[in-house]
Image (cartoon, rainbow, N blue to C red):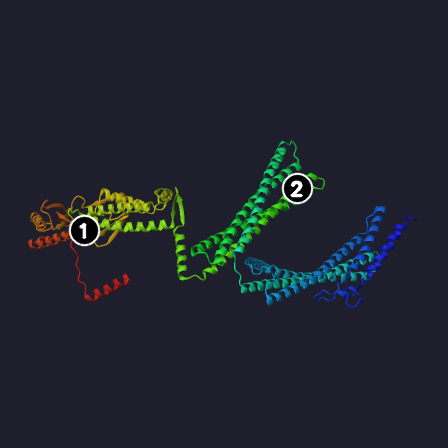
Amino acid sequence: MKSWFPILLLCAACCFELIEARAQPPILNAANGDITPIEQAVSDTSLPSAEAASPTKREQVAEELRVAQRTLDSAKQTSEENNVKPPERLQREVELLKQLEVVIAQHEAAKTEHIDQQTRLSDLDAQLAVVRESGSPEENSSSFLFLDHLRDDLATRQARTASVDAGVTSATEAIARAKQSLEVKEQGLRRAKELEQANTSDDKRADLANATKFAELEVRIAKVVVELKKQEEANQQFTKQLHQRQIELIEEKIRWIVKKGVIFSQEDLDTQLIEIAKQEDDLRSDKQLAESNLGYAEGEWSRARQQLDSSLEKDAALAEQVEAKLLAKQLYQTQASVLNSRLVRRGGNREIWERRFAVIRETATTDELITWNEEARARLKQLDTEKPLEQNRIDEARQDLVGIDKEYQAAGEDAIQVRRWIQEQRDHLTQLIQVHDANIVSIESSRRLTEKLIAEIGGDVQNWSLVEWAASLQHHAATVWNMEITKVDDHSLTVGKLLLGVFLIFCGFILARMLSRSLGYRLQQGRIHMNESGAAALQSLSFYVLLVCFTLTALKFVNVPLTMFTFLGGAIAIGVGFGSQNIVNNFISGLILLAERPIKVGDLIQIDELFGNVEHIGARSTIIRTGNNLDIIVPNSTFLENNVVNLTRGDDKLRTNVKVGIAYGSPTREATKLMKYAAVEHGRILNSPEPFVWFVEFGDNSLNFEVHFWVKVRNISDRTRIESDVRFRIDQLFREAGITIAFPQRDIHIDATTPIPIRMIPHDRFDHLHETHDSEAA
């Protein structure tokens, strides 16, 4: 009988639970004290207020949970006695009731927070009214430091506006998701009820009843979640109102203080400097402590490392200990470095406060304002660079922390020593993140202070006079002028030196050209009476020599050492070797032409098919003028790489000839005398050497002669003109002497051994034959 008692007790508990599940638990309506079903209590989806009742009572759910927990405990006890598992439906019911209790508790806490927000909003409204009527009630409201603090607070709250708006949007989206989840749960409940009503099998009746009960609990949870999300959305709206009211309050305080007038007194400055000095003392103490801890951590890490190296077997706990000591060393190293950076930053903040005092009190000069503005912008740029670096270090430390958490879980509960050292690694990484976070806060504080200085300098600049603007431009110009480009052997090359050197080299170029031209003119027109080609060569050489001298003088004047060009010389050599070799080749060729003088200005030369006079020999090319008055620019290297015919290199005497052919049967001796006479009587043909005539050959159609003579030529047209005159004179003399100048002719020989037939054709037949021939040809 005793053995059946627990089984009967379990059956009675199950029946009791089934009866409880069939009846919806009523709740107390807070408005009139009536009992209201849950469906009616949560059917209203309007915005909840602080006085509205919860969809279910927390105490009632707690009572349901106690009953279900007692039933589950009793079932577990019975199951242990009979070595069977307790029913899963009881565990599921307890879990759902616990979830419902938690959600109800969250809803009640949200309603309590809503009441507190209403109270805070009323307090802010009252404070705002007082400030608008009588000003800021704080005792130090007339202090510049208080005003500065209010501006910092205002900037911080304005920066949070976007996140507050995002919170409202997120809460609204959460309501939509909660309603969607509620609809899904209600659909599941309806399906469960339909299945239970349609069931006719006794075997499935209990399972379907349990499924309906679980679905009802899930719907109750979902409904409370909807009300919770509505309350949270209302709280977020109130948070937004509180945020806006706080901004309005701070703005009103600032407006009242500025209207009242605040002076940045020496006392305010001294107070702030004393506060910075205290912060610096604290940072120095922390830095000394970090350095002391660093020395101790290095010793601990070294001993742990030696112990690990001397260990014969692989000890996981010892390896984790080494890692923990290494992280401790890195932590204190980073802490000492960060504290030193913060200490330097505090010193910069002290200087900025002093400069702000001078700017606001208008005791700073124009040059100081310009310099301070540039330095503040440079500091701001440096701070903007440091912050992302610190954030990256934090992200890396958090990633390492995730990996260490995984190692901690993988170690197992039995590895107590391993978990101990892994936990120490986790603590060190957490402290490292805190160090970097503190550094970011310090960077942001210094950044805001620097931005204030820039803004205050900018406000002062707007009131500058024309003289102050001119001084500002002069300062900027001087800054650019003294900007250092590079430095070699304690000699700096600045923008000013570079520009001045270029200007002096340009002036030297103009002066060298003027002096070289004057030298060339005096060499030709002065007492020396040098020929044109020699004067041109000396003129070019003197130009390059003077240009080099003026360049070296200019570099010496601007205090630029020649050693500075050793690096540039290597770069130029590379450029010459690849891209400028043709230019340098032509330049060197020009120097060789000026030195060896194979050709000179005025020489009559021939290169391949180019024939003309040399007009100018330059650094890169030479100009040749043809008989058609065309200037041909020839690279100087061409004269050294090709065969050049210089017709006037030694002197201007040139032998030329005119070819004449006379008919067969003409008197050759008389023709020879006439041709020589035509050359001798010409005024520009030299008598020494004497002209002469050669009987060259018996040609196909003529007897060929050549009359040779010497002439003085300075250009290509002289030779052509003299040859033309000789030909005219020979033609005239031959006509007078009756000598015929031959022309091409052909003799036709006819074989006359047989008679040649000759026929007479009538005229009309000839026309017919002619037309027939034309048609055939067509």
Secondary structure beneath dot 2 equals helix
Q: Residue furthest right?
A: 1
Q: Between disc 2 and disc 1, whose residue precedes?
A: 2
Secondary structure beneath dot 1 equals helix
Crowd rating for badge 2 (residues with CA inside 10 Å; few <14, some 14–19, many 20+): many
Q: How many marks on residues?
A: 2
Residue 672 position (above or below residue 114): above
Residue nearer the viewer, 47 or 530: 47
Residue nearer the viewer, 86 or 324: 324
The label on residue 649 is none
Q: Nearer the viewer, mark 2 or mark 1?
A: 2
Q: Which residue lies furthest to the front in this view?
A: 267
Q: Mark 2 points at which residue?
A: 422
Residue ID at (19%, 63%): 761
Which quadrant of the structure image shows residue 118? bottom right
Q: Mark 1 points at which residue?
A: 716
- In this view of the protein, can residue 462 be seen by the observer? yes
Residue 137 relative to residue 62: left or right: left
Image quadrant where one finds the C terminus:
bottom left
Residue nearer the viewer, 446 or 714: 446
Residue ID at (63%, 31%): 310
Horizontal and vertical percent for residue 164? 62, 60
Distance of label 2 from label 1 (alpha carbons):
101 Å
Residue ID at (64%, 32%): 311
Horizontal and vertical percent for residue 572? 36, 44
Determine whether label 2 and label 1 are within 8 Å by CB.
no
Residue 214 relative to residue 516: left or right: right
Tag 1: amino acid: Ile
Horizontal and vertical percent for residue 390? 56, 49
Tag 2: amino acid: Ile
- In this view of the protein, can residue 707 be seen by the observer? no
Residue 67 relative to residue 497: left or right: right
